[in-house]
Image: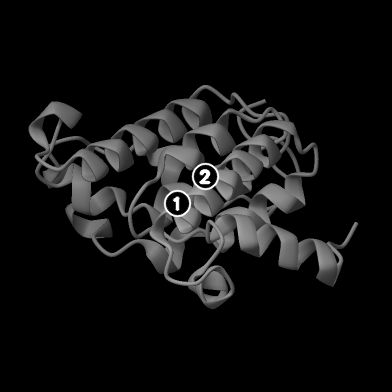
Amino acid sequence: MAISKKRQKEILRLADEGGDDLTDEISDDEKLFAQYRSKIRKEMLHFLRTTSEKKELHFFAQNWNWDGDVVPLFTLIKNPHCDAGTLLFLYWYGCPEDFYLFHKFASEIDGPCERDIYRLLRQIERKIVKSEYDSASIPFDPTNRISMWDQRDEFARSIPDIMYQPITGRKKRGG
């Protein structure tokens, strides 16, 4: 099933938490803008909890703005319809090599947003290692995202070998 253009636009609005393009419609009233952002966030979290369309979850992940809060991505990966390809996509776009090179534990990281990303990476890693997903039908090959392949043994926390393996979209991995 393809995602309609209208649905793509709705998901993009949520992935960007409303986007900056709508600020002109709200005016400069910061209180009204905060209320608007809160409303969009509630809609986004509801969407991430309730959608049963794995392609919509993947589309959201592909359009997520990594600048700032990543807490909604925890909701996305908890959705039982989140595909292994989406998990692996988020993992590598979260730059695990940057975090794992020097940090073995989240507590070693200073910034709260960076700690959240590290925790997100670890949760995704556990889900994939334990095959805690229902499908692996959305292909993703991490090869182009891996920048330190030859240095992976030098990380403070090593990346499991399975995280380097592409999701081909053919069958569930590990099972």
Q: Secondary structure at mark 2?
A: helix
* Left or right of residue 20: residue 82: right
**Residue that numbered label 2 is attached to:** 38
Q: x, y (%) of residue 108?
A: 9, 32
Residue type, numbered disc 2: Ser
- Looking at the rendered image, the quarter that the N terminus falls into is bottom right
Figure check: 30 above or below 39: below
Figure check: 57 above or below 124: below
Residue 140 visible from this viewpoint: no
Residue type, numbered disc 1: Ala
- Looking at the rendered image, the quarter that the C terminus falls into is top right
User: Mark 2: few, some, or many residues within 10 Å (few <14, many ≥20)?
Assistant: some
* Left or right of residue 94: residue 173: right
Quadrant of residue 141 within the rendered picture: bottom right
Q: x, y (%) of residue 120?
A: 38, 36
User: Mark 1: few, some, or many residues within 10 Å (few <14, many ≥20)?
Assistant: few
* Left or right of residue 59: residue 155: left
Which dot marks residue 34?
A: 1
**Would you say the residues marked 1 and 2 are in contact, meaning their CB atoms lie under 8 Å apart?**
yes
